[in-house]
Amino acid sequence: MSIGGIAVESVNNGVFINGLSSANYISNGVHLSGLINSLYKFNGILIGGFSNNVQRGNGLMIALINNCRQGNVVQIGLFNRIGRRVIPFINCRFQ
């Protein structure tokens, strides 16, 4: 748990709560930030107040703006992108 920090090149397992923004390498479990989440890979639940941006993901993403390059994800938000597909409100992809 942190108020506003950034943890780069880290692996987080369990519940990770951050006040403002975070930039992590891998997150397994629940990852919650007040504004922005930026990760290379996540497995579990990713909740951001404004945006989530990941390269690879497996699980649920909730924010106003969700961006995932590849993975098995369900996105809930105003702007959702998985790969090239952009769909508002709810977007999902299972490979």
Image (cartoon, rainbow, N blue to C red):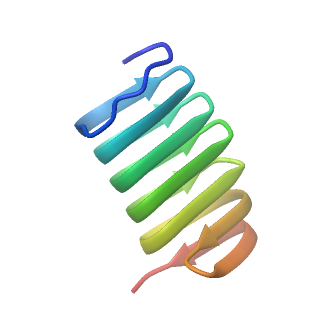
The residue drawn where x is 36% and y is 30% is 16
The residue drawn where x is 73% and y is 74% is 87
Q: Viewed as shown, does residue 12 lie left or right of 73?
A: left
Q: Position of residue 83 (x, y in %)?
A: 55, 78
Position of 45 relative to 1 (above/below):
below
Q: Which quadrant: the N terminus?
A: top left
Q: How many marks?
A: 0
- Occupied quadrant, residue 48: top right
Q: Viewed as shown, does residue 17 lie left or right of 93?
A: left
Q: Position of residue 5 (x, y in %)?
A: 44, 20
Q: Which quadrant: the C terminus?
A: bottom left
Q: Position of residue 64 (x, y in %)?
A: 72, 49
The residue drawn where x is 37% and y is 55% is 40
Q: Residue furthest front?
A: 8
Q: Position of residue 34 (x, y in %)?
A: 59, 28
Position of 87 relative to 63 (above/below):
below
Q: Nearer the viewer, residue 71 or 40?
A: 40
Q: Viewed as shown, does residue 37 lie left or right of 16?
A: right
Q: Viewed as shown, does residue 63 lie left or right of 8?
A: right
Q: Residue furthest bottom?
A: 95
